[in-house]
Structure formats: C-alpha cells, structure tokens
Image (tube, coloured by chain):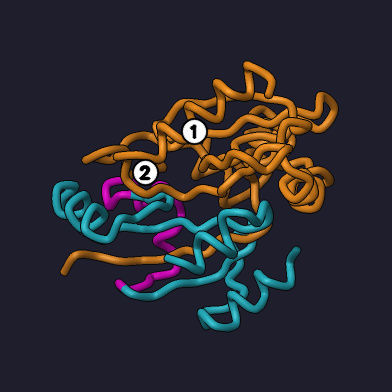
Chain colours: A orange, B cyan
Amino acid sequence: MHMKLKCLLTIGITATIGVGAVSARTWTSADGSKKFEGELKAFYKDDGKITVIMRNGHSVTFDIAKLSEGDQTFLKENAAGDAAAGGGDNVQEALKAQKVGSKLSSRGLLEKIDGQKFAKYELTKAPEFYIVYYSASW
Amino acid sequence: MEKYRKQIVPNAKVELIHVSLDDEEADATKWALEGKFPWPTVLAEHYEETGLSEYGAFAGESFLVDSAGKIVTKDEKEAFSKIAALK
C-alpha cells in the first residue's frame, strides 16, 4: 500500500479511538483493507481530490483513487455535479447567494460541539434545503 | 440522530441547523453534550441575526425550509420524504 495512504488510514483509525462521536462517513481504502471516519469538507472535481475532516478535527486532502469504488461512486453521485460541493471557496460563494446561507455563513453565527464546548463552525456545503430544528434543555 | 447521519450528512442538498433556545450558553452546551449533538448550532445570542427567529418556533419543532427561507413543510415525516427524494 502506498505510504501516504497508510499514513492517512493510520490517522483515521487512530482518530476513531477515544474521540467523541461526530457526523461522519466511513470511508474505505481502494483495496478494502482499511476504514476510517471523516466528514467530507470539499470535493475538488477537476483534481480528483477530496478534503475530509477527520474525527480529531484535522483536515486531510487526498486523491479519490485511494478510496473504494463505493466511495468514489458516492462522491460522483452526491457531490460531483453539485457546484456547492466543489470546494470550500465554492461553498462560501454559493452560501452568499442564499438568503439563509448568507446569514449563517458570512457572520460566523454557527457553532458546533468540539470537545466539551461550542466552537465556531463553517458550513461545508451549500444545500438547497435546511432542516431547522429548535430545542432547549428546559 | 440516525436519520441525521444517514440522510442529511451524506446529502449535499440538505443540512440540519439546530437552534438552541437556551438563554445561557452553559445550559446549551450541557444539553448538546448530553445529547451528543453532531450538527451545526445557532446559540440564542445569535438567534435573531440568523433570521431563523422569524418562524416563531418552539422547542421541539422542526421545519424544512428552502435556501430562500421559505417553509416547505413543518411535518418531520414529510420533510425526510422530501430529503430522500433529493438525491
């Protein structure tokens, strides 16, 4: 196995241990021997690369050829044709064009649990729809 | 939670935004940690700024809105049916 992929998968496997649950997809290596969890941050269609936020919060970018056929199909079906998923800059541009997205992104009003507290968070996609869920501890 | 992981996270066309109605961030944090909330959250201090207060929702409610802010449905079951059809 390519050393870089080995390193990546090692990071991924390590990251799944002892870290709180986050929203993520389980990715599989091209030969099916390794799996790791991470959240898709960007898909650079022209370069054939993706950026994944690992469970430890670190971002890694790598060639999609290192992923299983199933993962590559997932990317092509769910992100390839969607300009909003084309990369961080494209996401921010697409969000700015939205009434909802522009408010959520440009002012940095979103947060997400990171460890034991909330931390600033940026959307990683510019969706067509939002489920807005209201809750309180009381 | 399972619906979020399986139907929202992998779908580029939809995102869940959680609005915390707790006045105190400490309460919101405790609530989120207890629930292991994995989703983006708007804390009460930013609620008005996001424009999401215009729906006048109560705790426990959820809406599906389009990117222009128009409510598509207030019915959770219908919302997830629409999400499933987006792929």
Give the quarter of the image for residue B11: bottom right
Q: In the rendered structure, which disc, 2 or 1, sits on the residue that comes first in sequence?
A: 1
**What residue appears at the point 15 percent right and 51 percent down from the top-left corner?**
B24
Label 1 Cα crowd, 10 Å radius (few <14 / some 14-19 / many 20+): many
Secondary element at image label 1: helix
Q: Residues within 10 Å of mark 2 (few under 14, many from 20)?
A: many
Q: Position of residue A62 (x, y in %)?
A: 67, 25
The relative height of residue B46 versus residue B16 in the rendered view (above or below) is above
In the displayed structure, does residue A98 sit left or right of residue B76?
A: right
| Residue range highlighted in magenta | B43-59
Residue beneath disc 2: A112
Q: Chain of mark 1?
A: A
Kindly identify which numbered label has been placed on residue A44. none
In the rendered image, the quadrant that contains the C terminus of chain B is bottom right
Q: Quadrant of the N terminus of chain B?
A: bottom left
The residue drawn where x is 38% and y is 50% is B41
Q: Position of residue A115 (x, y in %)?
A: 27, 38
State left or right for residue B87 relative to residue A124. right
Q: Camera-side residue: A88 or A98?
A: A88
Magenta-span inclusion, residue B58: yes
Q: Which residue is mark 1?
A: A12
Q: Amino acid at mark 2?
A: Lys
